[in-house]
Amino acid sequence: MGIFFSVMLPVIAVFGAGYVLQRVKLVQVKSVAAVSIYIFMPIFFFVSLYEATFDEDYFILIISIIFILLMMVLINKILGKIFKWSKPVESASILGSAFMNGGNYGIPVIVFSLGVGATHFAVFYMVMQSLFIQFFGVYYASRGKDGMLQGIKQVLLMPATYAALLAFLFKGFGWEIPEGVYGTIKMVSEGSIPLMMIVLGMQLATIKTLKVNWQVLTSAVTLRMIISPILAYFFIKAFDLDPLAGGVVLVMSAMPSSASAAMFAIEFDTEPELVSSVMLITTLFSFVSITVLLNILAS
C-alpha cells in the first residue's frame, strides 16, 4: 500500500485534475498540448541538460534507451506486416509501446525503491528518453498521416531539438546564464511534467467511447509492460552496469506508455484515442506489474 499512496495516488490525482477541468470547462485540448510541446518542454530539456554531468554510466544509459526503442519499433513493424495495419495504426502502436512515462511516474518510483542516490541517473534517463520521444515520437506521430518526408520536416520544426543543442553549446563553451534570467527559465521548466500529465487527463475526458483495437491494445500492453523490462534485464546483464544505474534502466523500462507520445498523437491527430487507450490500460496494469517488479528487486 505504501507504493500506491506515495507514487500511484499522486499520478492519478494529476490526471484527475485534467479530467475534471475538461469536463467542467471544455478546454481545447490541442491548444493546451501545443503550449506544452512548443514552450514548456523545450525549456525543461534545456535546463535539465544544462545542469547535467556525464560519465561512462550515462553513456550506457543512452545505449539502453536506443536498444529498447529499436527493438520495440522492430517488433511493431513485424506485427504491422502480419496484421496488415495501416500506417496510422502502426504509428499509434509504436507511440503506445516504444516510449515510457519516466517523468512524474518513473522518478518517484525510483526514489522510493532505489533511494535518492539513484535520482541523478533517473533524471538523466528521463531527459534523454524524452529527447528520443521528441525526435522519434514526432516522426511517427506526423508520418502516420503525412508520410516520411513530412515526418522528418516536423521533427526539424520541433523547438525541443534546438533547445537540446543550445544546452550542449552552453555546456561545451562554459557559458553561464545570469542568475535572474536562469531563475525564470527554471521556474517555467518545473511546470512541464505536471502540465503534460494534465493534458492527458483532459484528453481522456474528451473520449466518449474508447477506441478498442484488440490487436494493437494487446500487443502494445504486452510490449510495454512485459517485453520491455525483459529486454532491459538482458541489457543490464550484458553491460554489467552500476547497480543503481541498472536499477534505473530496469524500473524505467517497466513504466506505462508515455504521456508525451500521447500528446504528440493529439497534436498530429494520429489515432489519439487509440494511443490514449493504450496509455490508460498500461497505467492501470502498471499498478500490479511495477509492484511485482519492485518486490523481485527487493528480494
Image (cartoon, rainbow, N blue to C red):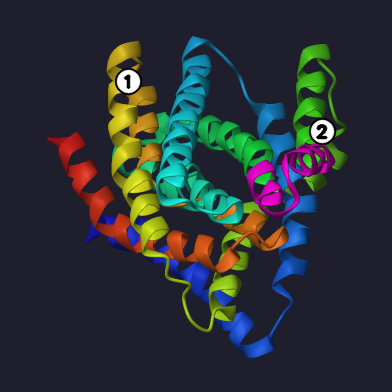
Residue 125 appears at what percent x and percent y?
51, 31
Quadrant that contains the N terminus: bottom left
Please name the residue shown 20% across and 35% down the image: 297
Residue 35 appears at what percent x and percent y?
78, 60
Query: Label 2 to label 1, Cα distance in Å?
Result: 31 Å
Please tell me whether mark 1 sits on a helix, a strand or a loop. Answer: helix
Drawn side of residue 238 relative to residue 41, left or right: left
From the viewer's perspective, is residue 185 above or below residue 179? Answer: below
Residue 267 inside the magenta-drawn segment = no
Residue where numbered disc 2 is placed: 162
Q: 132 or 3, which lies in front?
A: 132
Crowd class of label 2 (few under 14; some 14 to 19; many from 20; radius 10 Å): some
Residue 157 inside the magenta-drawn segment = yes
Residue where numbered disc 1 is placed: 236
Residue 280 picture quarter = bottom left
Residue 253 appears at what percent x and percent y?
39, 38
Name the kind of residue labelled 1 in the image: Ile
Please name the residue shown 78% across and 38% down the image: 149
